[in-house]
Image (cartoon, grey):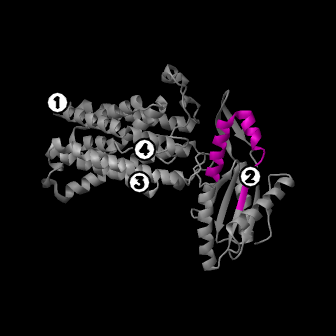
Amino acid sequence: MTAPRARPTRQEAGGITRRDRSGLAALVPSRWDLWSLRPRALTYVLVVDVLAIAVTVAPFVGRPATGQDWLVAGLLFLGAAVHAEAARHIERIRITRTDRPFIDLKSMWTFAGLLLVHLGPALVLVTATFAYWWVRNEQHPPPHRWIFSWATVVLGTGAAALVLLDIDKSTLLTAAAGPKGLVLIALAALVRWTVNHGLVVGIILLLSSPTPSVRRHLASPADTLLGLGALALGAALAVLAAASPWLVPILLVPVIMLHRGVLVDQFRQASRTDPKTGLANGSAWAEMAAKEMARTRRLGTGLAVLMVDLDNFKAVNDAHGHLAGDEVLRAVAAALSAEVRGYDAVGRFGGEEFVVLLSGVDPASASHTADRLRTRIGSLDLTVAGPGGPTRIRGLTASIGCVASPKAAGTVDELVGAADGALYEAKRAGRDRVVTAPPA
């Protein structure tokens, strides 16, 4: 997984935020933003990096690779480079126009390497493809982030190699392997994905504040299928290469089409997502709210709308800069999402305002949830990048307007209007409080 944009992300990737200074200065380790991470997060990253180096070196200690292994690894690297260049324009659009987790489909080449050659050259292939990706990436990700991304894939590949430890690879990709071969390859792909994904989610959780939501940071089912699908293509590539290497280029055609299919889906998602926070934007939230109102009306249950506004947010931007303000907005969005149920709808209304739809609640529980959200925002303790270096921000407050509709009466606009009116009353009464409007 790879972290492309404003939020940290996931495959053949890492989740360390913030960019280093551009130019040659970015290559100087002492200037990396890595050292500003919290102690636990820094320790986690360094341990993962060191383990990956050890795993890469270890295979060469016991058994030297053959010339055939290096030849196959070299051809796979050539295929990965051609793949990267063929999909370059599409990948550039995927990275810059959406904030969804970026799934690198080029993992098919490195997984094929695991199935075809000795582990040492297979891990060198991973390193070479990451180096090529870093050089050809116009945005040049921070070196420490690139290293962590590489490390998660190396450890995932090493773990997958344990599944195939006692297997003769010359027979694994032939009919002689039978159902056992299918099971082993599928298990190796699952282990590789799980370790890679788990390590990335781990650093994201360590960077989240205060109490992270594991569910929120896991890959979506669609992203998981896409990542596993890339590994399945790697298995097909390995079988094809073992049978007739000259047929391998044929696979590039469906892979490029898959890139385009993913791009279309990401455009659709991007049109419904707020780019700064990853929450639903206003129109998408209204659509979800209307569907939920219709459902609860049929069931005869209640719902509530909360309007959440950060108090004196302009002071944060003025004191720490707009980039720091954006980090605060992302932290608040994460806190709101973590505090409500998975089927409640959270959206960004605009500026520093958020809107929450609570399903199946009465006025008392809606008011209680609103106060819990206010307390959660007040407990945020963030370290953000400011003009003068890392800055600590805490003591945030929020005003919340709440309106409950016991039988889902009225329209979305009517409930939002009532909640907005209650929010105005909370502001006028002194901020940092919840005001509940009469039930709709």
**N-term mark: 2 or 3:** 3
| Label 4 vs label 2, nearer the camera | 2
User: Where residue 238 appears, x then y in whole percent?
Assistant: 22, 45
Asked which secondary structure carries label 2, the reply is: strand
Q: Which residues are magenta?
A: 306-335
Q: Amino acid at mark 2?
A: Asp
For label 3, the crowd category at 10 Å Cα-Cα, with few meaning under 14, some 14 to 19 and many 20 or more, is: some
Distance of label 1 from label 3 (alpha carbons): 35 Å
Q: In the rendered structure, are the residues bearing label 1 and label 2 in contact, judged by CB atoms less than 8 Å apart?
A: no
Query: What x and y, as percent, mark residue 339?
Result: 64, 57
Q: What's the magenta bit mostly, secondary-structure-wise? A: helix
Q: Is residue 159 visible?
A: yes
Q: Residue at 64% x, 41% y: name it.
A: 326
The disc, 1 or 3, on the residue closer to the chain's N-terminal end is: 1
Q: Is residue 331 magenta?
A: yes
Identify the amino acid type marked 4.
Met
Between 23 and 253, the one lying in front of the other is 253
**Residue position for label 4:** 1
Q: Residues within 10 Å of mark 2 (few under 14, many from 20)?
A: many
Circle 2 sits on which residue? 309
C-alpha span from label 1 to label 2: 64 Å
Q: Which mark is residue 270?
A: none
Mark nearer the viewer, 1 or 3: 3
The amino acid sitting under disc 3 is Thr
Please say if the residues under marks 4 and 2 sit with CB atoms less than 8 Å apart: no
Say whether disc 1 or disc 2 marks the residue closer to the N-terminus.
1
User: Which amino acid type corresponds to the residue marked 1 in the rendered image?
Assistant: Gly
